[in-house]
Amino acid sequence: MDNELKLVSGAMVALAVATATLVVLPYMEVRDIKPPPGLSPYTSAELRGRAVYISNGCVYCHSQQPRDSKFGPDGLRGWGRASVPGDYTYDKPHLLGSMRTGPDLFNIAARQPSKDWHLGHLYQPRAYTPGSIMPSYPYLFNVKSAKEAEAEGEKPLTLPPAYGPNVGMVVVPTPDALDLVRYLLSLDHTYPVLPALPTPTSTSTP
């Protein structure tokens, strides 16, 4: 009985220490953090696109957390400054990611601001990045006749000739594809997170 009591007591102490270290202390550290002035809340379309991003498992291959130069070459890869807690104020749930089968997307909108590029890349990644192992997402698009697309006021993708549909047919994005790209184009964290350094003033001597 004595040994059982010691075992349970030890387990409770270990659980309490782990909870304090991994939950309570981090919460107290970040609970009052405000969003940086350059960060805006997601629009309704961007939130829908974020849901498409989650449902298609993009977070399993892409991170959204560039590291400091002391911990990795993320800055040299063009992924931008290291992220800070305030960058994720409007992210619920957080999509930090733990794998980098593909590049980090924290600043993908700054690196690639073209809506047309993103749409084409989702339809057929290898048309834009030779050798890419990213899967294509054809179900986010419809193939229809050019006349039908024009009648419905839809803008077809401009694809490289080898990747386009049959003559007279075009590829048009679904609302999910458009919302997903709106979300990707919201991922621009190039705003400053530290206050500007004071400008030195010259003083004249009498």
Image (cartoon, grey):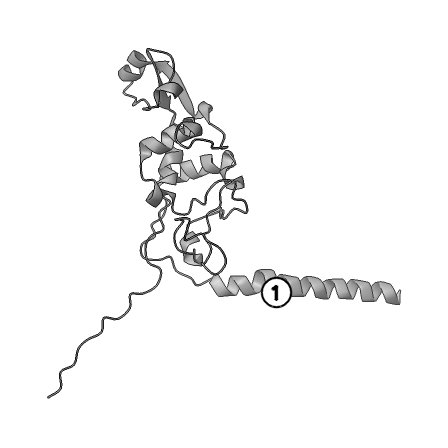
Residue 162 visible to an observer of this rendering:
yes
Indicate the quadrant containing the C terminus: top left, top right, bottom left or bottom right: bottom left
195, 75: nearer the viewer = 75
Image location (x, y in percent) of residue 118:
37, 33
Question: Relative to residue 53, is residue 168 depicted above or below?
Answer: above
Image: 153 above or below 9: above
Residue plotted at (38% across, 43% down): 108
Relative image position of residue 163 (x, y in whole percent): 39, 20
Residue at the extreme right: 1
Name which residue lies at 38% across and 39% down: 183
The reply to whether residue 89 is visible in this rendering is no
Which residue is the site of mark 1? Answer: 20
- Where residue 97 appears, as percent x and y from the top left, is 52, 46
Marks counted in the figure total 1
Which quadrant of the figure has residue 176? top left
- SS at mark 1 in the image: helix
Furthest-bottom residue in this view: 206
Q: Is residue 26 left or right of residue 173?
A: right
Q: Nearer the viewer, residue 191 or 205?
A: 205
Q: Is residue 61 left or right of residue 160?
A: right
Residue neighbourhood size for the residue with mark 1, other residues' Cα within 10 Å, grouped as few (<14), some (14–19), many (≥20): few
Name the spot of residue 174 as percent of width and height, x first: 39, 25
The quadrant in which the N terminus is found is: bottom right
The residue closer to the viewer here, 157 or 125, is 125
Type of the residue with mark 1: Ala
Query: On the image, which quarter does residue 116 sit in?
Result: top left
